[in-house]
Amino acid sequence: MKLERGSGTVGHGSAPAIFGGADTPSASCVDTVDFEPAFPPVRRQMPNAAAIVYSLYKNPIALLTRDHYTKDLVIDRMFGLRALSLNDPGYIRQVFITNRHKYGIDPIRKLLLKRSFSRGLAAVEGDEWHTLRRLSAVQFSSRKLARYAVDIAAICDRFCLRQPDRQSVSLASLATGLALENGMRCLFSKDRDGSFEPMSETNSNYLEHVLAIDVADILQAPAELPRLMKRRVGRILRRHGAIVETLYRQRQERIRSGAGAPDDLLTGICRHFISNTGYGDGRRAALDNIGTMLGASYDTTGKVIAWALYLLAMTPDALSAVRDEVDAGRHDHVSPQQWPSVLPHVLATIRETLRLYPAIPGMARHALEGDRLGPHPVRKGDYLVASTWLLQRSDRHWNEGSRFRIGRFLPGGEADGKADCYMPFGVGPRMCIGRAFAELESVIVLARLVREFDFRYASAEPPQPVWRGTLRSNNGIPVIMTRRGRH
C-alpha cells in the first residue's frame, strides 16, 4: 500500500490466456493487470477534536493515520476516553475469543441501538443472546441453504429478464434491491411487490443515519436527548418501524388463524416471543429482532455485490477469468448450492471484494476489567476496535494489500493459511450468523449478472468507501449496464 495515495491506479502488463479449462485454476492465472481502488487519503496524524467528531459521523475511515496502517496497536484519546485500534490478529483473537469474558458491548453501540432495536440479536448479551442465536441458526442449516439457493437463482433469472437492454444505473441501488428481494423471499417468505423499493430506501437510510456516531453518543448522553448531527433520525425510525410492524402484524395474523405460516425466520421469531413470557414486552422484543434481521439480510450483501461488479469492470484479466468460467456453464448442471465449488473464480472475486470492502469495517468492544495485549496494558473502560479494514488491507499481512487480486483466493493463493487476517464476517462466537447464506447468495448473483450484462463505470471520479452503518460508496457506483450478446 502506498500510504500517500488516495486514488485508484491501474498497472499494465501483457495478458496471457486465462482459465484454460483446468479443473483447479492456479492463483497465477489472473491479476496480470493490477488495480488499486480508491480509498480516503491516509493521515499523518490525528486531527483536532472537532475534526474527529465530524469524521466519526461522516466516515471514520477518513481518520486513519499512517500509524493505524503500520502498527499492531494504536491508542487514541478524546474526551477522556481511550480507544485502542487493533491491527494484529493475535490481539484480536485475545479480545474476541480467548479473553472475551473481559469485554462487552461498548456503550456507544448500545446508545445507537437503544432508540431502535435494543432487544435485537446485535444488541444483547448473555443468556438472551445465546437463545436468540440458536433461534436464528436453525434458519441457516445446510438443508435451508439448499432451498434458498434455488430461490435466489430463480429470482436472479427473473431480475435479468425484466432489465432493459441498456440503462444508466447505480450499482449500489441495483444490487441492494436484488439482495432485498432475495432476503425477503428466503427469510421472510415474501415475494416481490410494490413495497420493496421504498423498503430498500428506508432501510438504507436507517443504517446510514441511525447508526452514525453523533457527538452526543461519544459523550454518552441519554438516548432520549436529540442528536444535533442526526436530525432526520426520528422520521427514519418511524418509517422503518412501520415496515417492521407490518411484517410482524401480517405474520401474527397467519399464525393465529392457523392459515399455515411458512417455516422461516420471521415465523420463528414471532412464535418464540408469543410463547415465551420471560421477555416482558414480547412484542417489542419480536419487533427489535425482526428489524435487526431485516437489515442484516440484504444491505451488506448488496453492497458487496456492487463493489465486486465495479472491481471486475476495472480489472480486465479478472473479469475475463470470471466470465470464461460462467460462460462454460459447469454450474448449470449442479444445484445452485454447489456453485461456489464449481465457480472458483467467482468465489475468489467475492472473497477478495470482502477483503477490501468488509461490510462492517470495525468491531468494537468495551473493557469490563483490566487486561494486557502483549506489552500494552488495557484499562477498565477502554474501547477496543478490531479494524477489519486495517487488518485485511495492511501490507504487514498481505502482499500489496490495497490492490485487487482475485488470485489470492484461488487454490495455492496468498490467502491459504491466513484465516486470522481475513474476518469480513467478524470473529469469535458473535461472528455473523448468516455468513454462509451471504457468501452463497453473492456467488449466485455475481455469476448471473456477469453472464448477462456488461458494466462500464460512468464517472470521472472513482467511488470512495464510506463507513456509515455499513461500508458503502460515496456515489452509488454509477455504470452503463448493457445486455451481452448471445454466448
Image (spheres, rainbow, N blue to C red):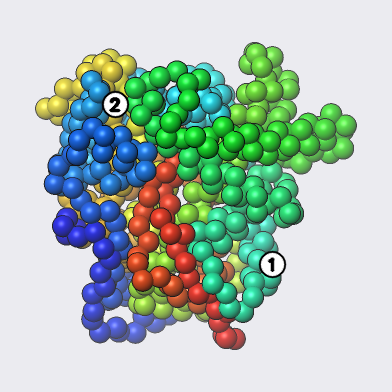
Q: Position of residue 386 (x, y in %)?
A: 30, 37
For the residue pair 96 and 9, the one nearer the viewer reads as: 9
Picture coordinates of residue 246, whole percent (x, y):
73, 37
Q: Secondary structure at mark 2?
A: strand
Nearer to me, 99 or 238? 238
Q: Quadrant of residue 120?
A: top right
Q: Is residue 450 above or below residue 272?
A: below
Q: How many marks?
A: 2
Label 1 environment density (alpha carbons within 10 Å; few <14, some 14–19, many ≥20): few
Work out whether 135 lies above or below 438.
above
Image point (55%, 82%), residue name: 484
Q: Quadrant of the N terminus?
A: bottom left
Residue corresponding to mark 1: 158
Tell me which label, 1 or 2, sits earlier in the chain.
1
In the image, 2: left or right of 334?
A: left
Quadrant (top left/top right/bottom left/bottom right) for the C terminus:
bottom right
Q: Nearer the viewer, residue 396 or 113?
A: 113
Q: Amino acid at mark 1?
A: Arg
Residue 383 is labelled as 2
Indicate the amino acid at tag 2.
Answer: Tyr
Tell me the tag on residue 1: none
Tell me which corner region of the image, top left, top right, bottom left or bottom right, holds residue 9. Answer: bottom left
Residue 469 in the image, given as x and y percentages of width and height: 44, 41
Residue 129 in view: no
Residue 362, located in which quarter of the rendered image? top left
Of labels 1 and 2, the one closer to you: 2
- Mark 2: give few (<14), some (14-19) or many (20+) Cα within 10 Å: many
Q: At x 39% / y 58%, what residue is drawn?
A: 353
Secondary structure state at the residue bearing disc 1: helix
Q: CA distance from mark 1 to mark 2?
A: 46 Å
The residue lying at 67 percent from left, 52 percent from top is 196
